[in-house]
Image: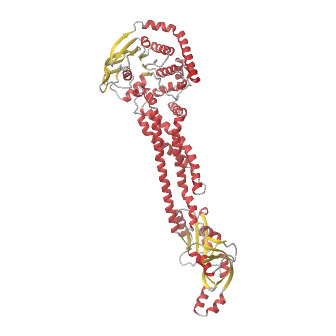
Amino acid sequence: MSLLELKNVSKIYGNLKALDNVSLNVDTGEWVAIMGPSGSGKSTMMNIIGCMDKSSLGEVLLDDVDISKISSKKLTEIRRDKIGLIFQQFHLVNYLTAVENVMLAQYYHSMPDEKEAMEALERVGLADRAKHLPSQLSGGEQQRVCIARALINHPEIILADEPTGNLDEANENIVIDLFRQLHNEGTTLIVVTHDPEVAEVAQRTIVLDHGKLVKEVINENFNQQNQASEKSAKTVKTDEEKSADKKSESGKKTKKKK
Amino acid sequence: MKKQNMFFRMITASLLRRRSRMLVALLAIMVGATILSGLVTIYYDVPRQMGEQFRNYGANMIFLPAGDNDGISSSDSDRALADIDKNNIVGVAPYRYETVLINERPVIAAATDFSGAKATSPYWYVTGAWPSESGQVLVGEDIAELYGVAQGDEMTVSFVPANTSEVSAEKNADENTKENEKSMKFTVTGILDTGGSDENYIFISLQDMQALTGESAAYDMVELSISATQDKLESYADKIGKDVSAVSPRLVKRVTQSETTVLSKLQSLVLIVTVVVLLLTMICVATTMTAVVTERRKEIGLRKALGASNKSITGEFMGEGMMLGGIGGILGSVLGYFFAELVSMNVFNSSITFQPLLIPVTLVVSVAVTAAACLLPVRSATDVDPALVLKGE
């Protein structure tokens, strides 16, 4: 069943077509990667799907609602209720602790619940860092807080814009494992990435170039990869988390020495 | 957790964990509130402070005999004084005037209570000393020159009853005058310089006048120095006029009107300065809040991306601003008192009166001014496009 449908969508800035007649279907529970070089229209597509921008032409149906023709206020409501956002730059509020940052999403959605927020942080392996400010967390930890914030309201769709762009390999694997868990729970994932390794783990990859959808690749081995990853997930995840934490700790020590 | 709790948790965290940024805004509000509270304190205390200063210019009310009465009895004067708030009375000086003879030449002698005269006429300049006991006289400068008397000299003052002196002028002057004349010797304690007609008089005590004339006559006039506004003085005069029919109270317009003029001008000046300070505070706070909002555009974008409505964003920023306004207002009202005290001690050389009502007033004004100053920058905050901000543009 189609959760998201783009029909001949274009986004035009003056003479520039950031998106040019793009059509795309994303089913409920699907994991889609969007790839393409800089300026190919990935972020524009992300903004349109994420209800942060409107298309100039075409239709964008999210859960059967055409979000290209509704008011900004309605867009805000849909963004709040249906979408979880993950950013390359993490975008945490720097004066709120990790748990408060997660509660911020609850605050705008419904009711802040510290216990639930703690559970979300526990899920991403950050229960012990809940009272830390973003400046006291490593990049990987900040991204995991960002993921906890994105999933706290149980959104229908999670949009991630270059989620591993600022992370080392160990933290990248942790994030991918978290995405895998979310996918297995039935969450729809759309991940914009430059990184072929991140795109490879998705069910389907679409490639944009100069605003046009130029290629679509189905990952035939997705289910096998997924099962294999799940089997090794517990042991690997623990090792990777330890390694990531060690790296972030040593990074902080080096900084302190400086 | 209730939404309100999270709201307060967020704005408290913003103020406490971004101390250095918020300190600038708080400082702006606090300085504004301090000057505002200080100036308003001075504004309300100026009449009292200036009233004390104006008492140096002499009496501002006099009692005269009402109707056909020849004078004011001591009891009528006391009844009239009872209508005036004792705390406001700076001095009371009753006067009785008689024509006396010095070296056979007529001179006006004024009998008064010298301690009262000192209080009602602080501008009198005495070379020597004020009379302090019976048999002493204060001589006006013109009389002193005329008779060539100086401090320490003795002078004989004679009194001839009025009907006798009239007869003596027309008929057998020498015989009648000498028959009824009463004389007393006085020691000159000081020479009086007032720059006015008082220099043509000699001043003796009421008791000496009674001894000299042999009769306890009523007062011809009572001078009063009262620390009060013109309106208050008028209300006292009305009350006395109704309560004591033998007394006709009159305001010394020359003094009361100049007091009112100077006071109203001074209060207008303080009011204008207060309004200007208020405007400057608003501009300062608005500038600071604009800087704060500009600095936090990404955060606002993020909040909007997470689903914050414009109303929520406005509420959060206004909440921060109003909390800052409240803290600044409380600190400002306390500091304002010390500021007013400092000004009062330097300008009026007296302590300021504490106005408790000024604390809530300063608090409310500070919060209102900060809220008004936040309005424009917060409105611009709601215009932030989350998509643009998150891209880092």
Q: Where is residue A152 drawn, in percent x and y? A: 48, 21
Q: Where is residue A81 drawn, in percent x and y? A: 42, 24
Question: Toward the viewer: B154 or B378?
Answer: B154
Relative to B329, does residue B271 appear above or below in the rendering?
below
Quadrant of residue A87 within the rendered picture: top left
Q: Would residue B25 appear left or right of B309 to someone viewing this image?
A: right
Residue drawn 50% across the image and 58% down it: B266
Residue extending furthest toward the bottom: B172
Q: Where is residue A28 drawn, in percent x and y? A: 39, 15
Relative to A124, does residue B358 appear above or below in the rendering?
below
Count of labels in the image: 0
The answer to whether residue B199 shows anywhere in this view is: yes
The answer to whether residue B220 shows anywhere in this view is: no
Residue drawn 52% across the image and 63% down it: B259
Q: Would residue A10 appear left or right of B119 to someone viewing this image?
A: left
Relative to B49, does residue A13 appear above or below in the rendering?
above
Q: Would residue A258 appear left or right of B373 to someone viewing this image?
A: right
Question: Toward the viewer: A256 or A20?
Answer: A256
> Which quarter of the rendered picture does the C terminus of chain B lie within?
top left
